[in-house]
Image (cartoon, coloured by chain):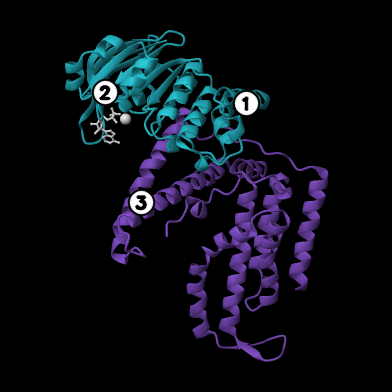
Chain colours: A purple, B cyan
Amino acid sequence: MIDPISTLSIHSHAESKSSVLNEFAPLPKMLLTVLFLFLTVSFQRYDWTGTLIFAGIPFGLAWITGHDAGRLFRRTLIALPFILCAGIANCFFDRSAVAMPFGGTMPGGFVSLFVLIFKTLATAGCVLLLSASTPMNDLSGAMASLHIPCVLILQIQLMFRYLGLVMTEAASMKTAYFLRNPECRHIPVQDWGHLTGHLFLRTVERSEAVYRAMQCRLFHAGTPLPRSRAASGPERMMAVSTGILLIFLRCFL
Amino acid sequence: MKVSFRQATVERTGHIPALNQLTCDLEFGAKGAIALLGANGAGKSTFLNAILGLCPLKSGEIEIDGTRLQEIRTHELRRRIGMIFQNADDQLFSQTVYEDVAFGPTHLQISDEEVAERVHHAMDVMGITALAKRDIIRLSGGEKRRVSLAGILAMQPDLLLLDEPTAMLDPRGCRELSECLNKFPAAKLIATHDLVFAEKLCPQCVILKDGSVFAEGKTEELLKDEAMLMECGLA
Ligand SMILES: Nc1ncnc2c1ncn2[C@@H]1O[C@H](COP(=O)(O)OP(=O)(O)O)[C@@H](O)[C@H]1O
Ligand SMILES: [Mg+2]
């Protein structure tokens, strides 16, 4: 009933043993992720074979490189409820017939629901895998080397930090709620209002404290961002060929 | 190092003065430690925050080595004075132990090699080298304290402020902490209501009550005065 923070936290397993993916230079990794997102989103809305294969890529990659693919998949599922709401509505409106490979047809709304699910798995899985295999500092370094404005990177860094805070605060509030209310299995809707209000206040309070701690250790907006390791020759080759392979897959699926 | 408060007043929201016309002089030896004692709400945290310029004074002055706080560059002030927050979770905001210890030094305009050297040295002194790659959120209370200390040690401050360092530590954690503090090469100002801990580490102490100095002097002697301790909520 009580989620351990680890399942909620977006701070991923940085302590996991070194894998090929962890060691790979951050910049090409980030660029490949962006390319992958772009290609995934570009699939047509009935293109279920292509999206299915793309949805498999992040998890396959995680599995091959020794990351916990099951855990990655479970985390990705968190994004699904939102998509399902949109997709299910589609089932009622879109009734055009779509041909299936083994003969017969399926309603269009149904097919597009699956395409939506696959796209979500692919994009969320890929982003989570990137964050699991690359420390935030390296990502900021990679963004800095692309000449993305410092303010924007800072924003992303802080957001990442505060999101973590919201998550831990929410987890501990939930624990406290259930411990004093052992019979209860779901937090009733009428309690959500004041709980979220409270969560907001607590998070603001804690983020102020964290910001003070950062200031005490000489952080101020506009300080030089940490540089990340540049990609070596073989890594570039590898990244470019992976990119071409992805584009090829997208065009011929 | 010398820190002086001259009739300093700080108001938190709600307009209760958290420090009320507070005047005192703290003289630190090279590795000297002074205890800042007081019951909950006496103003200890506010006192420490005021030294770092984290809560503005409504009136009065604070001087560091005879220079007024406003005249010291913030960067300089925060390099020279490090602070350990009461809640270690507020203090540690990076992902891994190594990253967190390196956070301060990377903002010091020193070479990457020197940053790495300082981080390794600090982790070595605090005995957390084995934890370097661990996720911050998966550490015990005592480990978090030592990581916080290493993060400040790596910045090589002259003065270390500690806000209730023994809160949330078990007896062994307290013992380890006092060993770590003995190894820490800086003057220390320790805000606490843990009298045993204060007496062990600090020959001198200042007792606060309702935002002003209630008593100051030798810790050993002051802590014998039961009636006085009772009056300021420490016994
Ligand atoms: N964030 C805050 N907002 C408003 N008032 C505060 C806040 N923090 C502390 N205070 C008030 O300031 C006074 C001194 O608090 P503090 O310095 O935290 O004491 P101590 O650390 O000795 O327990 C208390 O009366 C408290 O109510
Ligand atoms: Mg306090």
Q: Within 8 Å: ligand 1 and the Cβ of disc 3?
A: no
Question: Could you tell me which chain the residue with mark 2 belongs to?
Answer: B
- Please, what is the three-letter code of the amino acid marked with disc 3? Leu
Which quarter of the rendered picture does the N terminus of chain A lie within? bottom left
Question: Residue at position x 70%, y 50% from top?
Answer: A29
The C terminus of chain A - image quarter:
bottom right
Residue B14's disc number = none
- Kind of residue at disc 2: Gly
Q: Is residue B98 at all visible to an observer of this figure? A: yes
Q: Is residue B76 visible?
A: no
Label 2 and label 1: CA atoms lie apart by 36 Å
Query: Chain under label 3?
Result: A
- The number of callouts visible is 3
Q: Name the residue under label 3.
A: A199
**Front-most of residues A103 and B219:** B219
Closer to the camera: disc 1 or disc 3?
Answer: 1
Q: Where is residue B104 in the image (x, y as percent from the top left)?
A: 54, 28
The mark found on residue B120 in the picture is: 1
**Quick one: SS at disc 2?**
loop
Q: Quadrant of ligand 2?
A: top left
Q: How far apart are the two marked residues, 3 and 2, measured between alpha carbons?
A: 31 Å
Q: Which amino acid does label 1 sit on?
A: His
Read off the residue under disc 2: B38
Disc 1: CA contacts within 10 A as few (<14), some (14-19) or many (>=20): many
**Residue A161 horizontal/vertical position (percent):** 49, 44
Residue located 57% across and 49% down the image = A12
In this picture, residue B86 sits left or right of residue A220: left
Q: Do the residues labelled 2 and 1 touch (CB within 8 Å)?
A: no
